[in-house]
Amino acid sequence: MRDESPEPMDSHKCRVCRFPLLVAILQLLLGVAITAVAFLMLAISPSLLTRETPHWAGIILCLVSIVGFILYCINYLPDERSSMQFIVKFLYFVLCAIGLVISVVVMAFAGHHYSQASSFSCDEVEEACMCTLNPGDPIARTFTYEGVSDCEVINGTLTLYFLLQIVLNLVQALVCAVGAFIMWKHRYQVFFTGLQIGSPSFQHWQKV
């Protein structure tokens, strides 16, 4: 007669919840969303500057998520077992930090342009929209948006897109911060995300 050890939990259960797969998936989805919103903004007017349509930020964050998928595919462990794993982990940590900085920069630009666009006073001039912050000031700076037939798009839709970029990049900054923090914690505090089954006193099984 033999006492059987407890059956291990299914290793495939909640595979998506494992690090770094969940973080990489969120980064990919948010990167795609940021890129899509940026191109929708660019469709409003070709006069929008690159800093106003941060599709570049979304593309970079998608690349960060790809490195996260590669890290997951090489059997992620808190302690490095090979030089390849160390290199990919270090690269993913650096890219998460860069993604955090990029998201903060995009939020700063989007917040600035949102405050401007929400205060614009616009007039239609042929196939363009001329906007200014202070219509009574003859030397006030003028913003020209070409290819806009209705200036309400600038005061309404464009400001909504700026606000959406702020929210998406805020969430993306938090995700990148979580990814970088977990990588740092695993490396320097030996923090394991797995589950421990049983206790040391039950590791030796007796045969009768």
Image (tube, rainbow, N blue to C red):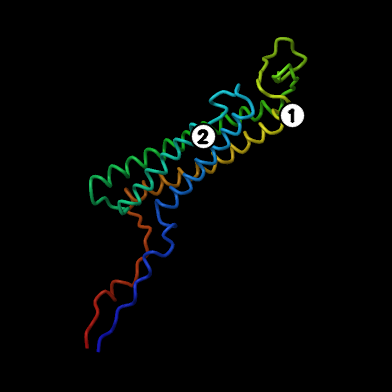
Q: Nearer the viewer, residue 174 or 33?
A: 33
Q: Quadrant of the C terminus?
A: bottom left
Q: Residues within 10 Å of mark 1 (few under 14, many from 20)?
A: some
Residue beneath label 2, please?
104
Residue at image point 76% right, 17% down: 135
Q: Nearer the viewer, residue 208 or 55?
A: 55
Q: Nearer the viewer, residue 55 or 107?
A: 55
Residue at image point 67% right, 14% down: 141
Question: Is 40 placed above or below 201 here?
Answer: above
Give the mark, 1 or 2, whose residue is nearer the N terminus.
Answer: 2
Secondary structure at numbered mark 1: helix
The residue furthest right is: 136
Q: What is the x, y in percent for residue 189?
A: 34, 51
C-alpha span from label 1 to label 2: 28 Å
- Rendering quarter of residue 113: top right
Secondary structure at numbered mark 2: helix
Question: Is 82 placed above or below 95 here?
Answer: below
Q: Amino acid at mark 2?
A: Val
Residue beneath label 1, please?
152
Q: What is the x, y in percent for residue 119?
A: 72, 26
Q: Quadrant of the N terminus?
A: bottom left
